[in-house]
Image (cartoon, coloured by chain):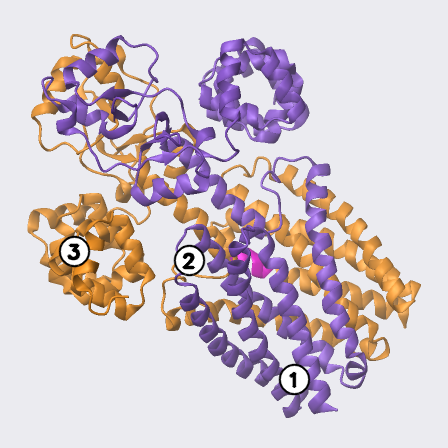
Chain colours: A purple, B orange
Amino acid sequence: LEESRVAEVEDLVEGLHEADTADLLESLGREERQLLMEIMGAGFDPEILPYLDETVREEIVEWLGPAGFAKLVQALDSDDAVELVQELDEDMRIRILAALPQAYRRVIEESLSYPEDSAGRLMQREIVAVPSVWTVGETIDYMRVTDSLPDDFYDIYIVDPRHHPVGFIPASRMMRSVRSVRLDQIMEEDMRVIPLDLDQEDVAHMFRQYDLISAPVVEKSGRLVGVITIDDVVDVIDEEAGDDLMKMGGVNEADFYDDVADTTKSRFTWLAVNLVTAVLASAVIGLFDATIEKVVALAVLMPIVASMGGNAGTQTLTVAVRSLAMKNLSEINASRFISKELIIGFINGGLFALLTGTVAWLWFGQPDLALVIAAAMIINMVVAGLCGALIPLGLEHFKVDPAVASSVFLTTVTDIIGFFAFLGLATFFLL
Amino acid sequence: LEESRVAEVEDLVEGLHEADTADLLESLGREERQLLMEIMGAGFDPEILPYLDETVREEIVEWLGPAGFAKLVQALDSDDAVELVQELDEDMRIRILAALPQAYRRVIEESLSYPEDSAGRLMQREIVAVPSVWTVGETIDYMRVTDSLPDDFYDIYIVDPRHHPVGFIPASRMMRSVRSVRLDQIMEEDMRVIPLDLDQEDVAHMFRQYDLISAPVVEKSGRLVGVITIDDVVDVIDEEAGDDLMKMGGVNEADFYDDVADTTKSRFTWLAVNLVTAVLASAVIGLFDATIEKVVALAVLMPIVASMGGNAGTQTLTVAVRSLAMKNLSEINASRFISKELIIGFINGGLFALLTGTVAWLWFGQPDLALVIAAAMIINMVVAGLCGALIPLGLEHFKVDPAVASSVFLTTVTDIIGFFAFLGLATFFLL
């Protein structure tokens, strides 16, 4: 593809949108990527950087060195620059900040002083704020002559003398109003204000809940300090929904772009936890080895009970994790959710007890074995429903992310209960 | 809470944003919900409807009847109305359309004629489109006097005489330009145009990829017919990310709000599929019952091999499903992904072979048993990595949603290979 046809590659890249160039860089292998970077050389557009995946970007930062990277960063909007800089590791971040001109560095450093994943980090400082006594005409004239405003904006904020936001006017409404109209006559007063330290997950929830396009960010005192726009929130929504999926699957969010060593390492941790729980479940089986020796059919059938419990529990767990993330489930309606899950566990448990019992009977011709597996199935599926609901609710209550740890706990419980109920009942009734 | 204090409840609801009222309705039980609806009565704000979950909304539709619901729908913007109507079942949809005034019905019916989940359904028909020869002043005057424009908009589209979009101007830029400037001097020509039949998932990808706020929708001929704005896309992004999570967990997207009967039924299907695969895995164990009878330790240890394979495979699967959804993984870089997963499977397989072998040795004091479980572990984890990558890629290739069916296939494979490798090797070497 790109051996020696440098000129062709140059032409190709030139015609691409920055986002597409970023995709191209991501889809290449490490060596090809460096080759392409060399070809692009000084023509490398800084706007490509925000679109790159973190891991790929780090590679490029290393390759460019702090000075080279700092030069590119300066060409970006402050919120994009903050996003890039905050994702670097401590050491590199300090070196890059040192390479930036002082005024620019101060802006970045102030943003970095807000807690990670807070509204302060997401917001843009450039904002259009005008007093309510102005007319539409005055405002438009002000906007025409003022250079420090953001390139594009959606809402104009109206502030009182203390610089507290009191309302907003969408740009399109401002444009359609007659010049002599006073702003307080057309402004929207029903406005959602975001505190500087609000978690980005809650920011996303507000945007989603109220269909916002942009929202003002205020300090504790109520002073307007910035604005968050929906494009930043889309990234957050994407990230968080994907994060939950990845966490439930036991992988790191950056897994796809991490190199083999990092991926192997991060997955190892999760699998090691799983090994401990699997050994625990095996220990439960070990308690009944004498029973199994006499009735081998038990060894054949026991994974069915555990597997059905695990799957039924995962269903409940998934619904709980998603509903908690979307703030549909909370402590108010938790008891309704739990009782619904218990009923479902009981009904489906009963149905699958019947099915599995029949299969076991036909297979081994032992009616008492069929009864034992049926009873174990009901027990395990009711427990699965209960734990699938209680575990994430409990983790959420103790401020632990329910997506990340729930499924280990859950399958440990369903394996142990599954094996214990089935083999225990068998020992009691079949021997 | 709300027994007789009707006036208090009325006051409370009045002060709420529509989205919050919707949440309140959702969080109540069926009877309380009806009570609240009765209290709100004629004061029920139609804007609440789009915020409601589908299942709750259906209940309200049934309760209001077609005529009552049609009356509320008319008060909404056309794209919101389409969204509500399309989610109803066939029968109710026809009755509600019949109850709408003819002009309004025609607009809704035309939108419904576009394929489900396509750009045509998402778009809004109200749009600001002006010729490029106009000046800023002419455009602003036009917008001031024209009533049929949308309430708020972000971009003004410039069209040629055939009504094909040739560029756009953000509202804020228009407002800041001098009245005498011609539109083609300030318009942005680098514009992403969305075909009417593009799938909503691809629409979302375009918005995300190019950080769009709104984008024009065109017919096959290139004529501008509507606009999609980011707030509609946020809903799509939310929906699709959540959908993948729910599908991988084996539950329906509406699970949380469905009643017990519907939830039980939809979960039953998934569990029934799982029962079949669990019985298949048991049949594999059944092949080796003579071996287990002689070495009971095998029954104790075999779930470890299967469980580790299942978890390692799920890790790969999760990354593949998410990367496919985000269009980071495609047939171009599939082979790199597969070989990465194979290497990881081999490394982690080797590490866990060592760990599990050691555990088995210490536990049962049989070095040959330890070797057998170690070998089975490597085999199963490499197969898990391979299948975790190949199954979703294969499903995607055949246009089947990889999120929905992958994990059944995967755990079937890892269970069967896990049991077969472990018990097969044991039969061969230990007897």
In the foreground, B54 or A195 = A195
Is residue B233 left or right of A305 when viewed as pictured?
left
Mark 2 → mark 1, Cα distance in angstroms: 43 Å
Q: Which residue, given by chain and number where applicable, does mark 1 sit on?
A: A363
Q: Is residue B405 visible?
A: yes
Dot 3 crowding, Cα within 10 Å, few <14, some 14–19, many 20+: some
Residue A1 percent across, percent down from the top left: 61, 23
The quarter in which the C terminus of chain B is drawn is bottom right
Disc count in the image?
3
Numbered label attached to residue A151? none
The magenta stretch spans residue B408: yes
Q: Is residue B169 visible?
A: no
Residue B161 percent across, percent down from the top left: 16, 21
Mark 3 → mark 1, Cα distance in angstroms: 60 Å
Is residue B286 left or right of A218 when viewed as pictured?
right
Numbered label attached to residue B44? 3
Instruction: Write the start and end of the magenta stretch as one range.
Output: B405-409
Under circle 2, the secondary element is loop
Numbered label attached to residue A329? 2
Q: Mark 2 — on which chain does it sit?
A: A
